[in-house]
Structures are given as structure tokens and as C-alpha cells.
């Protein structure tokens, strides 16, 4: 019996070989030749999981975040030299979170003399403001 349609096996092999070659090349390019992505300043303070961060880790992250806020012009340069006032674990909207406080008497507006930063319990930055809320 003769098949209705026949094609040489070399065509099937070449087609499979080409697909494999293209797939492998695409994977290699995406892994090795793609431009690297650089994380923002303060990126060493990105944590996964639910393990609570220590006060020392959160303090370090708050100082890094404060420096990046100064660099971005979000807060005055006088904040750069300000030392941490306190770091405490408080009840937040989604459970426990870190509240870090900096006080800067050099700021003339009394409502902006205190900078509050909030971090999740594992140490990820949530927000910064002057209200503490």
C-alpha cells in the first residue's frame, strides 16, 4: 500500500533541528545577552517571607531610604545628618509594622520636623510622611 502523501525524513529532521536551534538560541540570548536591570538605591532592603526583621536591620533600611529621599529631593538635605530617634513595632493596617522616627530641629516648619517611615514586619518599606499615620 502506498501512502497518500509522503515526504522525506530529512525534511522532518531539519524542521525539528531548526526548532531546537531557534529555541536554544532564544533562551541563550534572553539569559546571557539581555541588558542587566539595576535595582534602585535601598534595594538591599527588599525581603521575602514573613520572618520579622530585627531593629538593627530596619534602622539600616530607614537610613538608606532617608538618604534616597534626600538624593531625590523629596526632603531637605538637612535630613541627611539626622540620627534615628526611635524604631518601634506598632499595630498597622495589615498587622504589625515598624515605625521609624527621625527628628530634625533644623526644619523651620514645626509640622515637618518629624519624619516617620513605615516598614513591614519583615523590613520592606511601606511609606514615609510627617504625620505618623
Image: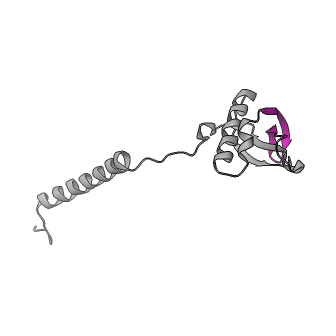
Residue 3's x, y, as percent? Answer: 13, 68
Q: Is residue 119 visible?
A: yes
Please name the residue shown 80% across and 46% down the image: 94
Side of 55 relative to 33 (left or right): right
Side of 53 relative to 101 (left or right): left
Q: Nearer the viewer, residue 119 or 9?
A: 119
Occupied quadrant, residue 45: top right
Residue 6's x, y, as percent? Answer: 13, 67
Quadrant where the image shows the N terminus: bottom left
Above or below, 31 against 51 in this view is below
> Total number of numbered labels?
0
- The scheme the figure's colours follow is one colour
Magenta segment's dominant SS is strand
Above or below, 78 against 57 in this view is below
Residue 15's x, y, as percent? Answer: 20, 59
Residue 51's x, y, as percent? Answer: 70, 32
Is residue 74 found inside the magenta-colored segment of the image? no
Please name the residue shown 34% across and 48% down the image: 33
Q: Nearer the viewer, residue 84 or 12?
A: 84
Q: Is residue 122 visible?
A: no
Is residue 85 found inside the magenta-colored segment of the image? yes
Side of 130 relative to 68 (left or right): right
Above or below, 32 against 88 in this view is below
The magenta segment: 84-105
Q: Nearer the viewer, residue 72 or 38?
A: 72
Please name the residue shown 59% across and 43% down the image: 41
Residue occupying the far right of the picture: 110
Side of 117 relative to 19 (left or right): right
Residue occupying the far bottom of the picture: 4
Amino acid at each position: 500500500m502506498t501512502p497518500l502523501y509522503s515526504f522525506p525524513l530529512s525534511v522532518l529532521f531539519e524542521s525539528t533541528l531548526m526548532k531546537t536551534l531557534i529555541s536554544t538560541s532564544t533562551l541563550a540570548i534572553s539569559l546571557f545577552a539581555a541588558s542587566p536591570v539595576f535595582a534602585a538605591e535601598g534595594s538591599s532592603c527588599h525581603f521575602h517571607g514573613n520572618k520579622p526583621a530585627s531593629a538593627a536591620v530596619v534602622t539600616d533600611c530607614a537610613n538608606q531610604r532617608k538618604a534616597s529621599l534626600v538624593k531625590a529631593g523629596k526632603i531637605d538635605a538637612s535630613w541627611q545628618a539626622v540620627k534615628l530617634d526611635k524604631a518601634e513595632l506598632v499595630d498597622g493596617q495589615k498587622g504589625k509594622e515598624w515605625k521609624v522616627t527621625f527628628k530634625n530641629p533644623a526644619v523651620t516648619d514645626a509640622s515637618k520636623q518629624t519624619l516617620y517611615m513605615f516598614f513591614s514586619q519583615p523590613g520592606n518599606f511601606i511609606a514615609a510622611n510627617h504625620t505618623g499615620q
